[in-house]
Image (tube, helix red, strand yellow):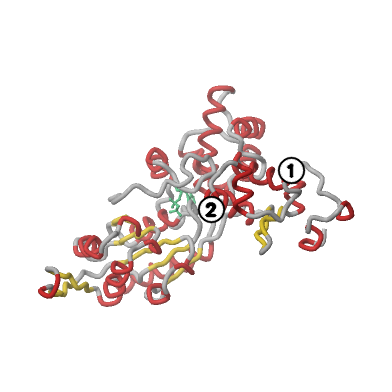
């Protein structure tokens, strides 16, 4: 495997953050399902991918290019490795931001072996010239390498061995249509159901040689934001607590106590998420309030509130982005144990927005 650049570490310091650091990558490698049978959940994607790979194997051909979209930590890298394993092919791993120039991509493509899987994470963040080179490589297994500069520059066509591109993106909608159209198979990965996360947690506990009961696993699953990476991470932190403060066995009480220490609440909100909600409710009566004002109140950058905290709060139905500003939903008041203001006490727009 070849990590061409460190993965984007935005939010790495958060226990419920999206990306992992290098230490986490090492643990994750040990916990990754190795084949489709071991991969939990995502039934549709698994079934479809199984057909794509079987058919390619039966034809003795290289599998079609695959596009995987979905939030970080849902298993895109894992699936790309499974694709390589099922095709008995080597895999090369890189990412869009690592490819600054078309030449970087040409160097990678021209060193691929026949049938190799190229995993391109964050494919939507590739530079435009690299993207255009990729179109031709995907379609015709050919690139034009430009030699020289200025008027004397010449394009030398270079044949590539057939390969399978596995592109990953957080949103398929971010990709230009010509790129999207060149994938033979596109799969959207959904957030996981709590029951699926429980299976992920039991599987990981088994691999890490940890003892955990059903209620302990359910408690961690409920706080994992639908994301296996977060489930595995919370499991490791709960393990630490169980080893230091208890007899090592992970029960519901231990999981609750441990996650209280790490400030991950019953729905998986962390300190930042709760800070945003609390400011919105306590300082602005539930909104609407502008993003910049809200960010100042929380003492965070605008981008942090918008990109790190809000997506999950919106997904959980706790916060809404409206043209007039950010608004807390009735569920947000309930979650923080507060009483929503009565509409009659001089409305703050909540009633119009939610009919509460
Ligand atoms: P992504 O590439 O989408 O960010 P990864 O493939 O790196 O996510 O997955 C993160 C971690 O979550 C992996 O280490 C893996 O152990 C675990 N994981 C992801 N999906 C599954 C799954 N379906 N079953 C079991 N574990 C999973």
* Label 2 residue SS: helix
Residue 220 on image: x %, y %: 60, 41
Please name whichever residue, 315 or 212, is drawn nearer the observer in this view of the structure: 315
Please name whichever residue, 53 or 8, is drawn nearer the observer in this view of the structure: 8
* Label 1 residue SS: helix
Say whether disc 1 or disc 2 marks the residue closer to the N-terminus.
1
Please name whichever residue, 8 or 77, is drawn nearer the observer in this view of the structure: 8
Residue 217, quarter of picture: top right
The residue under the point 36% across, 63% down is 166
State the CA–CA distance, disc 1 to disc 2: 22 Å
Position above or below: 306 against 215: below
Q: Nearer the viewer, mark 1 or mark 2?
A: 1
* Residue 114 numbered mark, or none: none
Residue 11 on image: x %, y %: 48, 45
In the rendered image, is residue 195 in sight? no
In the rendered image, is residue 355 in sight? yes
Identify residue for label 1: 282
Identify residue for label 2: 307
């Amino acid at each position: 495997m070849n990590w061409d650049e460190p993965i984007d570490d935005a939010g790495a310091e958060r226990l419920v953050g999206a990306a992992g650091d290098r230490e986490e990558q090492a643990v994750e490698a040990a916990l990754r399902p190795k084949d489709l049978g071991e991969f939990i959940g995502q039934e549709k994607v698994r079934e479809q991918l199984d057909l794509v790979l079987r058919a390619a194997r039966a034809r003795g051909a290289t599998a079609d290019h695959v596009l995987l979209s979905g939030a970080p930590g849902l298993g895109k890298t894992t699936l790309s490795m499974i694709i390589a394993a099922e095709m008995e092919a080597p895999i090369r791993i890189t990412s869009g931001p690592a490819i600054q120039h078309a030449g970087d991509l040409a160097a990678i493509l021209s060193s691929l072996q026949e049938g190799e899987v190229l995993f391109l994470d964050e494919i939507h963040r590739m530079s435009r010239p690299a993207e255009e080179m990729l179109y031709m490589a995907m379609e015709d297994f050919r690139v034009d390498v430009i030699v020289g500069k200025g008027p004397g520059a010449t394009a030398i066509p270079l044949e590539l061995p057939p390969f399978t591109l596995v592109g990953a993106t957080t949103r398929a909608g971010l990709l230009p249509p010509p790129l999207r159209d060149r994938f033979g198979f596109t799969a959207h990965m959904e957030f996981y159901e709590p029951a699926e996360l429980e299976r992920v947690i039991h599987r990981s506990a088994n691999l890490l040689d940890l003892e955990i009961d059903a209620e302990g696993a359910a408690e961690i699953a409920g706080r994992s934001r639908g994301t296996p990476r977060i489930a595995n991470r919370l499991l490791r932190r709960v393990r630490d607590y169980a080893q230091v403060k208890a007899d090592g066995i992970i029960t519901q009480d231990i999981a609750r106590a441990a996650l209280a220490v790490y400030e991950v609440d019953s729905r998986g909100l962390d300190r930042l998420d709760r800070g945003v909600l609390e400011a919105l409710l306590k300082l602005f009566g539930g909104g609407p309030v502008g993003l910049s004002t809200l960010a100042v109140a929380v003492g965070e950058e605008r981008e942090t509130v918008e990109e790190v905290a809000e997506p999950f709060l919106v997904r959980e139905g706790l916060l809404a982005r409206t043209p007039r500003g950010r608004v807390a939903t009735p569920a947000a008041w309930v979650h923080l144990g507060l009483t929503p203001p009565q509409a009659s006490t001089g409305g703050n727009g909540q009633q119009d927005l939610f009919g509460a």
